[in-house]
Image (spheres, grey):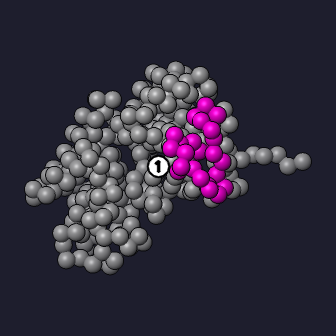
Amino acid sequence: MKVNLLKKIGIIGYGFMGSVIARRLAEQKDEYEVFVFDKEKSKLFGLGGIKVARDARELVSRVEVIILAIKPQDFDHILKEIKGSAGNKLIISIAAGISTSHIEKILGQARVIRVMPNIGAKVAESVTCLCKGMLATDDDLELAQELFYYLGAVRIIDESMMNAATAISGSGPAYVFYFIENSTLDPGNIPEHARHDMMRRLEKAAETLGFSTEDAAFLAANTTNAAISLLRKTKLPAPELRKQVTSKGGTTEAALEILTRGGSWEEAAQAALKRAQDLSRRL
């Protein structure tokens, strides 16, 4: 008799990032069994290779790992809904600005990993930063790395740098799109010198926010390459991709306000970091 050793992964929230994660993991049929739930049921029709749960509690009861891919405004409601059934399961949150301690406070003795992927996930070239909460183990962190390697590059950082990562790898693609949009460069054929110039600008911005030389180089190179790959593979114009990264009142909007006034990438990143910190405090 064959024993089913598939890891059962549940994803609450089937928006852009939740759906990308679900599809990438569902493709690994020999590794994972994927369950999803979203309050908007219309998003969940006809999902091949992905199981749909009736509600968040049912999803939690059927999986070992819970990925929270929901908007910050819906977050506390979902945490309270699953509090009694989450038990000793691993919680992975991709919600921007929500700390591991906030999740631990609501759920109790929870093993929490905080993750921040970026738009590069669309073409399997995400730059994803991870950190672990107080009770999460090294094995939990290793499992989270394993899951997000399917989306692209992964970097473990200290949680104190997560807002800075939002300003660099999260908002950084928009700096690249804005630069290309306002240049004479061919988006489908970016020359090496221009690619290197953008990497160096983003690397300097990352160092300004406190990243080590090594981390800054990793985030800058992978974020720049992901943005350029998006342009090439999706064939969407730079302004359209820039809009996809820019949410109203968010970190990217704050950075672009600086760039449109002629500010540097360092100044733009600092504005994005300040907005990320402000949003975190509100939560």
3 relative position to 39: left or right: right
Q: Dividing the picture into quarters, in which one does residue 105 lie?
A: top left
Look at 62% across and 56% down and name the residue there: 46
- Which quarter of the rendered picture does the C terminus lie within? top left
Horizontal side of 7 relative to 155 (left or right) equals: right
Q: Which region of the structure is painted magenta?
A: 35-58
Residue at 32% over, 55% down: 245
Q: Nearer the viewer, residue 214 or 47?
A: 47
Pick out the residue farthest to the left: 261
Give percent across and percent down for residue 241: 32, 63
Q: Amino acid at mark 1?
A: Gly
Residue 53 in view of the camera: yes
Name the residue: 71% across, 55% down: 30
Give coordinates of residue 11: x percent, y percent: 56, 43
Picture quadrant of residue 94? top left
Q: Please, which residue is most extreme toward the front here? A: 42
Residue at 25% over, 74% down: 193
Q: Is residue 48 magenta?
A: yes
Q: Position of residue 81 (x, y in %)?
A: 53, 26
Residue 25 is situated, as x and y percent measured from the top left of the image, at: 60, 53
Drawn side of residue 254 relative to residue 233, left or right: left
Q: Secondary structure at mark 1?
A: loop
Q: Is residue 25 above or below residue 102?
A: below
Residue 225 visible in the snapshot: no
Left/right of residue 157 with respect to residue 176 in the rendered view: right
Give the labeled residue for mark 1.
15
Q: How many marks?
A: 1
Q: Is residue 65 above or below residue 125?
A: above
Residue 33 or 56: which is nearer the viewer?
56
